[in-house]
Image (cartoon, rainbow, N blue to C red):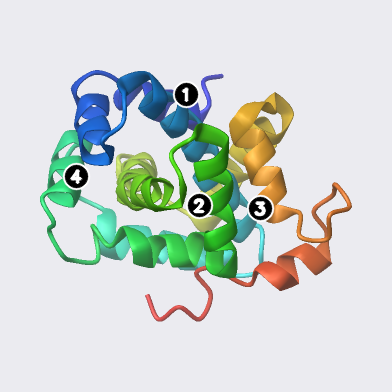
Amino acid sequence: MTSLTDDLFSQLSGPALQQIAGQLGAGQAQTAGAVAAALPMILGAMGRNTAQPQGADALLGALGRDHAGAGGLGEILGAVLGGQQDRQTDGLGQLGHIFGGQLPRAQAGLGQATGLGDDKAQLLLKILAPIVMAYLAKRMFGGGEPSPQALGNLLGQEQAQVREAGGLGGGLLGAVLDQDGDGALGLGDVLKLGGSWLGSGR
């Protein structure tokens, strides 16, 4: 089964990747590697959020309210790169919900691992967050009956696949989510993270 990360990465290859590389001022190969590392980190963290009580309900509500009916990924990318300001393109706000207080740790890890540095890593995450949200909204609202359980299952499977696959994205996800440094994600880690869609007012 193709992972969400692989499917989304394939949709971002070609012209979209060139646009992102241009925005970052980085080469295409470096940008591709950074995108390939960032996507599983974002989706894996969302999987962790939806495993919390009401987490899937809150995320599904945000997807339906702000992202259902969004255009294609190229259109979303154009809006984000063009500086459009609304809830659909608010990458930084979305990252705050996804990573919470661990956002600095996530962007620092990505910047160091890919050679982009903190600032460009944050910019990349801000570009990718609205794209991931639009992609998930299309998956959930594109047909059938969307439910928190279905969303939680989808992202839970993705998080497990990311962890199992390892690689740079899996390693970064583990480093961001494992706050105790014990190699396992436990209740203490979740409590320290705290940054989910809960109580976000979205």
Q: Amino acid at mark 2?
A: Gln
Tell which circle, 4 or 3, labels the residue nearer the N-terminal end: 4
- Compared with 85, 4 (above or below) is above
Tell which circle, 2 or 4, labels the residue nearer the N-terminal end: 4
Report the quarter where the C terminus lies.
Answer: bottom left
2 and 4 marks in contact (CB < 8 Å): no
Tell which circle, 3 or 2, labels the residue nearer the N-terminal end: 2
Q: Is residue 70 visible?
A: no
74 on left or right of 95: left
* SS assignment at label 4: helix
Q: Amino acid at mark 1?
A: Asp
Tell which circle, 1 or 4, labels the residue nearer the N-terminal end: 1
Q: Which residue is mark 1?
A: 6
Spatial separation of the CA atoms under disc 4 and disc 3:
27 Å
Q: Which residue is mark 4?
A: 76
Q: Which residue is mark 3?
A: 176
Tell which circle, 1 or 2, labels the residue nearer the N-terminal end: 1
